[in-house]
Image (cartoon, rainbow, N blue to C red):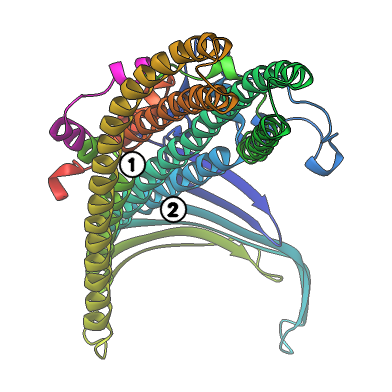
Amino acid sequence: MRRSFPTVSICLSMGLLLSVTGCATRPTTVDEIDCNDAAGDCSSAHQTASKRISGPPRNQRDLTQQPPSLTVAQTLQNAPDVNAALARSSAAASEIDTAAAMRMPQLSFDSSSGYSTSEGNPFTGRAEGRAYSYTLTAKVPLYQGGRDSAALDLAQSQYRASIETSKDVLISTALSLLSAQVQVKRTSECMAIFDRHLRSLRSLRINVQGERQAGAATSVDVGEVDRQLLRLEVERKQSALSLADAQETILRLNSGLVDKSVISTSFVASRLPQILPDLLELAMRNNPRISTRLARMDAANARIDQARAAYNPSIGLALSVGGQRSPGNRYEEVQTSAVARVSVPLYSGGAREATIQGRHEDFRAAALDKDSAVLGVRAAVTTAFNRRLHAQAMLELSRRQLSVARSQIDGVKQERKLGERTVFDEIRSISDAADAELDVARAIYELAVSEFVLAAETGMLDDILGMRTGPAPASVVADYPAVLQKS
């Protein structure tokens, strides 16, 4: 149960107003992201967004300066999208306090003081002097027809949806970052492969040029080597363009991550099930998109109860005590009252039925959104699982192909010296080895991306990175209905 503590605020503006409202203990929404990354020191989740985003304004920063090297957890903690989602969670938590305050009594104090004159009758004459009045009023809600419960259920459901949305934003940002890191690593390796084989072709060109001068080779042989050199140069430039595209995501997140900081694919795979049914079960239970839709279904159901309760009877008690004194009166007049107010809506002109019907349609739409999310997650997990199987097979075949291609290079060189092979054969062997190395790099990339996608779709990526978002704190979810019971 949520504990409520009264808070007193005093305002003086044309009178004195004293209000006492119930304020439930405020849940710490940002505590959901608990940064425990061993490589970095993530600050407390209770920090506000303004404290997390420090430094000069973005338009005053030196954008040409290389950002410092950060861990994955530090980069995600500083990401504006993640912090914006956490700020929305904090705002949703405040709505829980507002809803809980509906059950609390309200106390107000009004007073006025001044100087006044009045014309009396011929017997009393003119009256003048100081006049004042004051009133202390207490309004106690006795029965609200379920309005308070429906408002609290709605606020709690919206808060839980905001928490799951924050987790979804965190995981999506992490997936984009890790995919970009793997792409950067892959393109860098591809460029290194092109550099190695460019050196091999340049060495071959020198040999062929010497053979041409000796009459053992022709200009056609030299031209073919030059053509292959140009082809590799073009492909290297294409890899450089791909590298620039991959680095855009890293720069957008203001990350200084380097290749060596890419998380190990085998480590990710060790934290995930290896068969499709287990992956699907884990995704149905943990995927934040599904959890968000379930929470929105709860919120839509709470709006139905809220629409019904809006036309229920309500009972309240108003207590007041006050006094006043006017010019000409020697004594203060004291007044007290106790009024019970009963409100019973009798006829709404069809508004009640129309409102409830609209809320039912909202619930139906939320249920369909949940079904759509389930189908999307199921398709994403199945596709990523098949992608992982194909990538594993491709990696094994590519490594075998690379081993054969490397062994053929030396054999072709020796056979060409004996006159059994031509320059074209040696060029082809070098090209085959380069293609095999590129296939290995691509297979490693595809395998890494499939593992990251599986970790993201099963809702485990934040836990693997040491940045668990988890459910809301126990003090907040004590009254929450189980999310899976309403699915």
Q: Amino acid at mark 1?
A: Pro
SS class, disc 1: helix
Q: Amino acid at mark 2?
A: Gln
Q: Which of 327/373 is in front?
A: 373
Going 57% across and 26% down the picture, which residue do you hit? 427
For disc 1, the neighbor class at 10 Å (few under 14, some 14 to 19, many from 20) is many
Which region of the structure is painted magenta? 266-282
Is 73 located above or below residue 333 in the figure?
above
Which-is-in-front pick, marks 1 and 2? 1
Is 86 located above or below residue 320 in the figure?
above
Q: Residue 274, image x and y in percent?
A: 20, 24
Q: Residue 337, image x and y in percent?
A: 39, 63
Q: Which of 79/132 is in front?
A: 79
Instruction: Look at the image and say whether residue 116 sits in the magenta stretch.
Output: no
- The label on residue 200 is none
Q: Is 115 positioned to the left or the right of 379 in the image?
A: right
Going 74% across and 22% down the picture, which residue do you hit? 212
Is 134 located above or below residue 382 in the figure?
below
Residue farthest to the front? 215
Instruction: Say whether residue 356 is visible.
Output: yes
Residue under circle 2? 106
Instruction: Look at the image and say whether residue 272 sits in the magenta stretch.
Output: yes
Q: Which of 235/102 is in front?
A: 235
Is 323 located above or below residue 41 in the figure?
below
Residue under circle 1? 288
Instruction: Say whether residue 146 is visible.
Output: no
Q: Residue 105, image x and y in percent?
A: 39, 51
Q: Is 23 positioned to the left or the right of 419 in the image?
A: left
